Image (tube, grey):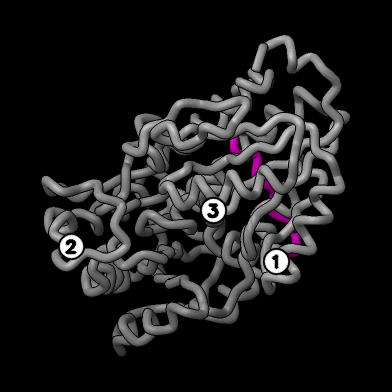
Amino acid sequence: MKKSDFHEKIEKILLINLGGIGDVLLSIPAMRALYKKYPKTTMDLLTVPRSPDTIDNSPYPTSIITFSGSPASKLKLLWLLRRERYDVAINMRSLNSSAGALKMWLLLSFLAPRIRAGRDTEKRGFFYDVKVPESYKCARHEMEYCLDLAARLGATYRDTRMDYRLTCEDMAYADAFLKDNGVTDTNAVIGISAGAPWPAKRWPLERFVEVARKLSEAGLRVLITGSEDERYLEKAFAEKDMRIISAVGRTSVRQLIALIKRCSVFLSNDTGPMHIAAVVGTPVVAVFGSSHLKGFDPRKITDSAVVFKGEAECSPCERKFCPSMKCFDSIKPEEVTAACFELLEKAGDRKSE
């Protein structure tokens, strides 16, 4: 695809991001760059359930389309998208497998945009007209790959700010939730996200509990978060003397974001809530095991982050399941606890009842 081709009139862009909440958040700077380059263009985002709530207050996509439901409803949606005759369709995610590449090729072939763009992971993106070379080993941060892709489409505006917007209603919910659980404006709240979609990404739960115990003993309020599928977390943290507030399975995505914004420090595995904390400016302590740190390091987004990366000869591996989890052995509860206190002190926000 010649560079001059991008001077042709572009009226409709379809962004495709079928990753999780964190993946969509990290694509915000690239979406903003495309928006500024093509301000009069219709720019739609095709994504998965839960992700729309993450950026439904963003000005960049003209509309957010959820790819979900039965096979019949998905096919109907694809027919409607095909009729839009998009000038450009951009896959914002990696092609992490040959099967994933085949699915994306089929999707783009069906939608039939004039220009097909995406990240050419390990040369699997043979079907893209515009591509960015990418290594599976995450040689660069996810946000930077998305920005590189936008630049290949003429959008060279490389502003990495995460201008995420929370409404007054969002913050009112968070304040009311915490007030109902005995938290005052003077209390520091430490958020903890001990879950993750993949078991191999989870620092051992008993270590999170140990950190929570130490924080609670210091008079701090501890808020645990998680999805409806992670109700088991409540039982793990249910110790009589711990000052635990549970939001597990009790919030929408936007309500979760508001609660994370209200936290003084947020401790998390490498998962969506970690990215949320970094984006909304909450100091974050992140624990990485099997993941590629370079691709998802929250320190690329915020200066208020401490990261612990497990050491093992097999890490990073990106496995979903691991029989040994030995990469987490080197990360001790006491050093994670110390990092939480360190960030509290830096923020001048160490308050207790």
The residue located at (69%, 48%) in the rendering is 165
Give how far across and how far down residue 78 sits, in percent: 75, 56
The kind of residue tagged 1 is Ala
Q: Earlier in the sequence, mark 2 or mark 3?
A: 3
Q: Nearer the viewer, residue 241 or 193?
A: 193
The kind of residue tagged 3 is Gly
| In this picture, residue 194 sits left or right of residue 11 | left
Numbered tag placed on residue 325 in the rendering: 2
| Secondary-structure class at tag 1 | helix
Q: Residues within 10 Å of mark 2 (few under 14, many from 20)?
A: some
CA–CA distance between discs 2 and 3?
24 Å
Q: Quadrant of residue 28?
A: top right
Residue 241 within the segment the image draws in magenta? no
From this viewpoint, which residue is outermost toward the bottom?
240
Q: Nearer the viewer, residue 122 or 301?
A: 122
Numbered tag placed on residue 172 in the rendering: 1
* Residue range corresponding to the magenta coloring: 160-169
Give how far across and how far down residue 301 sits, in percent: 48, 37
Of circles 2 and 1, the one toward us is 2
CA–CA distance between discs 1 and 3?
29 Å
Of circles 1 and 3, the one toward us is 3
Q: Earlier in the sequence, mark 2 or mark 1?
A: 1
Tag 3 residue: 19
Contact flag, marks 2 and 1 (Cβ < 8 Å): no
Quadrant in which the N terminus appears: top right
| Secondary-structure class at tag 2 | loop
